[in-house]
């Protein structure tokens, strides 16, 4: 029988033990995601109201150990090359812990801006892979750093516009098919830049609402399986556009809760699969937007605790469902 409530204590314990298996091969094979995993775990803990479950000083020290001094940004693990994705996660962790003063903001800003291509899209690193994900990451990071004014906004928006499809959705590059994850990053980037007018909102919201399957879960594109991570990506865009009610919240809540590991904690991509910190974070993030009782509000644009974004004066006009009482 599927669990009908969020197993907060088990999920907290699960996240706390994630770094204890340094002798396992899987630990070392996922080094390229380490910074992201810390951000996912920390944000999930914050959303559950357990920010202090991980050691703050240890976390900040780890982040700073990933500084790539040659590039002026952060890698995913000590001695890894800097990448825009791990740099955003590092910034988000430091902002959450009010430790952004540890960063050379000028150098990080220079690194991020250097990755914008002539077309307007951003590359992830000096090797040149481009994706609208990286454009969102650049916009998010520059906003958190207080340096958004240095971005070429028109060039950035122009490329996102080129990625908009006939169905209202967005792809990862111009001409690519619509995908829920890319919809999230493009909508969120446009929200931060105050350019939501670039979106065909009726078509996009219809397309997003069509991502819900009979079992309540959401998929990333037509004819694909449901996955817990899309709970956040679809809901983020809908909440930013004020159409969260277009999803059956009760059925989606049941689906997310059914993917929990009731013994060891954590949430999987779907019921019966192995849990991981990525799906744990995005499942809890989705539940927060759905108004699940006892959770802290999560800002769907920055994917960070809403009180932090509000304190920075960066909140946009998103709407979550009303928080239900316990």
Image (cartoon, rainbow, N blue to C red):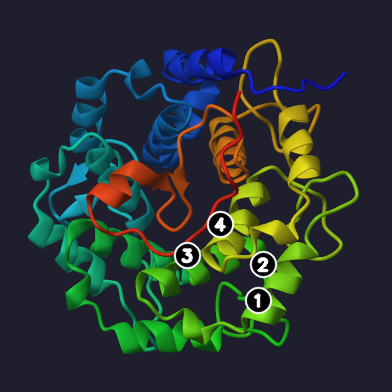
Residue lying at 26% horizontally and 63% vertically, measured from the top left? 143
CB contact under 8 Å: marks 4 and 3: no
Of the image marks 4 and 3, the number of the one nearer the N terminus? 3
Q: Is residue 118 left or right of residue 282?
A: left
Of the image marks 3 and 1, the number of the one nearer the N terminus? 3
Rendered location of residue 241, percent (x, y): 56, 69
Camera sees residue 203:
yes
Label 3 packing within 10 angstroms: few (<14), some (14-19), many (20+): many
**Of the numbered discs in the image, which one, if any, rests on residue 133?**
3
Nearer the camera: disc 2 or disc 4: 4
Label 4 packing within 10 angstroms: few (<14), some (14-19), many (20+): many
Of the image marks 1 and 4, the number of the one nearer the N terminus? 1
Q: CA distance from mark 3 to mark 1?
A: 14 Å
CB contact under 8 Å: marks 2 and 1: yes
Q: CA distance from mark 4 to mark 3?
A: 15 Å
Local secondary structure at mark 1 = loop
Q: Which residue is mark 1?
A: 169
Q: CA distance from mark 2 to mark 3?
A: 12 Å
Of the image marks 2 and 1, the number of the one nearer the N terminus? 1
Nearer the camera: disc 4 or disc 3: 4
Q: Is residue 128 left or right of residue 204?
A: left
Camera sees residue 75:
no
Q: Is residue 245 above or below residue 130?
A: above
**Of the numbered discs in the image, which one, if any, rests on residue 179?**
2
**Of the numbered discs in the image, which one, if any, rests on residue 236?**
4
């Amino acid at each position: 029988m599927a669990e009908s409530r969020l197993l907060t204590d088990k999920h907290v314990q699960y996240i706390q033990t994630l770094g204890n298996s340094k002798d396992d091969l899987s630990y070392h094979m996922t080094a390229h995601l380490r910074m992201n995993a810390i951000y996912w775990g920390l944000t999930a803990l914050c959303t559950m109201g357990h920010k202090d479950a991980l050691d703050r000083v240890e976390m900040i020290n780890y982040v700073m150990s990933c500084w790539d001094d040659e590039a002026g940004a952060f890698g995913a693990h000590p001695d890894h090359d800097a990448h825009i994705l791990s740099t955003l996660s590092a910034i988000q962790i430091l902002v959450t812990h009010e430790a952004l003063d540890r960063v050379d903001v000028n150098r990080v800003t220079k690194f991020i801006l250097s990755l914008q291509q002539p077309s307007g899209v951003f590359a992830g690193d000096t090797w040149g892979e481009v994706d609208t994900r990286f454009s969102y990451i650049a916009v998010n990071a520059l906003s958190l750093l207080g340096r958004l004014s240095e971005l070429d906004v028109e060039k950035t928006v122009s490329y996102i516009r080129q990625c908009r499809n006939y169905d209202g959705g967005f792809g990862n590059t111009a001409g690519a098919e619509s995908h829920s994850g890319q919809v999230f990053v493009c909508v969120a980037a446009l929200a931060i830049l105050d350019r939501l007018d670039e979106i065909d909102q009726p078509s996009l919201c219809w397309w997003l609402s069509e991502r819900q399957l009979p079992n309540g879960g959401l998929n990333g594109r037509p004819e694909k399986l449901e996955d817990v991570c899309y709970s956040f990506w679809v809901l983020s865009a809908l909440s930013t556009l004020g159409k969260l009610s277009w999803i059956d919240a009760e059925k989606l809540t049941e689906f997310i809760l059914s993917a929990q590991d009731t013994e060891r904690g954590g949430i999987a991509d779907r019921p019966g699969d192995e849990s991981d910190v990525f799906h744990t974070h995005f499942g809890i993030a989705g539940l927060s937007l759905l108004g699940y009782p006892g959770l802290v509000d999560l800002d769907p644009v920055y994917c960070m605790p809403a009180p932090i974004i509000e304190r920075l004066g960066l909140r946009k006009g998103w709407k979550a469902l009303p928080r239900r009482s316990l």
